[in-house]
Amino acid sequence: MKMKMDAGSFYIPKHLTPPGQDDHFICSEQNTIGVADGVGGWSKKGVDAGDYARQLMDNTMTAIYDQTEGPIDPKGVLNEAFLKTNLKGSSTACIITLTGNKLHAANIGDSGFLLLREGEVVYQSPVQQRRFNCPYQLGKSSDSPSSAQELTYSVKLEDVIVAGSDGLFDNMHTSEIEELVKHGVEEKYTPQQLAWSLAWFAHSCSLDKLSSSPFEIAAEEAGMEHMGGKVDDITVIVAYIRPMD
């Protein structure tokens, strides 16, 4: 049976001030989604950290639409986009496509995705970072797409993909994501409604100085102190694996 990704998204910029530093896309025609997170350190040099992420995602979409034959190659389209993105800055990126019953992804940095089956996480993309809070990142003075991990995993009907920037994964534990996804599926949320639910939960956690967030735990493991959540841009894309119409 042919399958598709039925996807929706929600984005909450840092401090609720648009446009923020994240960007993303959903290309339903090609069963492909992507998210990028501009590296905030560039703001200290007077560079809008989100500009690079936005141009990178725009160029990725162009590369996808320009591919008229064969399945989408996530690393290939990411490389094409990278070569055409000439702004100052850098960004993490995760591109995911569905071909047959296989998810194929190219991921660089600490954006990423989870695959849930019957409410439980069965796969999580690994994080690439050089040290705590210093992810791999695409940029002319940083990393190239050759550093991106190529990931493949089989899917089944009714699986759920949750992709996002680190603003999601730094503030929500896997168990919390599982719980909200289970609830959303039971209540027949649309992908966008579930993305909204996850994004706002992560946002509330980011402002909670008393919660034991994944970011706080990672900081402690790195010998650093951080209390509670991490205020950040939060992008969430949710995709249900459905039968092709």
Image (cartoon, helix red, strand yellow):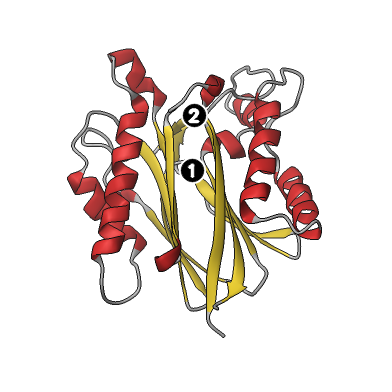
Residue 136: quadrant of the picture: top left
Is label 2 in a helix, a strand or a loop?
Answer: loop
Residue sitting farthest toward the bottom: 1
Q: Residues within 10 Å of mark 2 (few under 14, many from 20)?
A: few
Residue at (30% x, 43% y) in the render: 56
Q: Tell me the kind of residue under disc 2.
A: Asn
Question: Do tag 1 and tag 2 residues touch (Cβ < 8 Å)?
Answer: no
Q: Residues within 10 Å of mark 1 (few under 14, many from 20)?
A: many
Q: In front: 164, or 69?
A: 69
Q: Is residue 9 visible?
A: yes
Query: On the rendered image, what quadrant is the N terminus found in?
Result: bottom right
Residue 154 lies, with reference to residue 191, above or below; the image says: below
Q: Is residue 28 left or right of residue 43?
A: right
Residue 192 tag number: none
Residue at (72% x, 55% y) in the render: 189
Mark toward the start of the polypeptide (1 vs 2)? 1
Residue 54: quadrant of the picture: top left
Residue 111 tag number: 1
Query: On the rendered image, what quadrant is the C terminus found in?
Result: bottom right
Q: Would you name the residue on which mark 2 appears?
A: 133
Residue 129 lies, with reference to residue 151, above or below; the image says: above
Q: Is residue 241 left or right of residue 139?
A: right
Residue 124: quadrant of the picture: bottom right
Q: Position of residue 59 (x, y in %)?
A: 27, 48
Is label 1 in a helix, a strand or a loop?
Answer: loop
Residue at (56% x, 63% y) in the render: 6
Q: Tell me the kind of residue under disc 1.
A: Ser
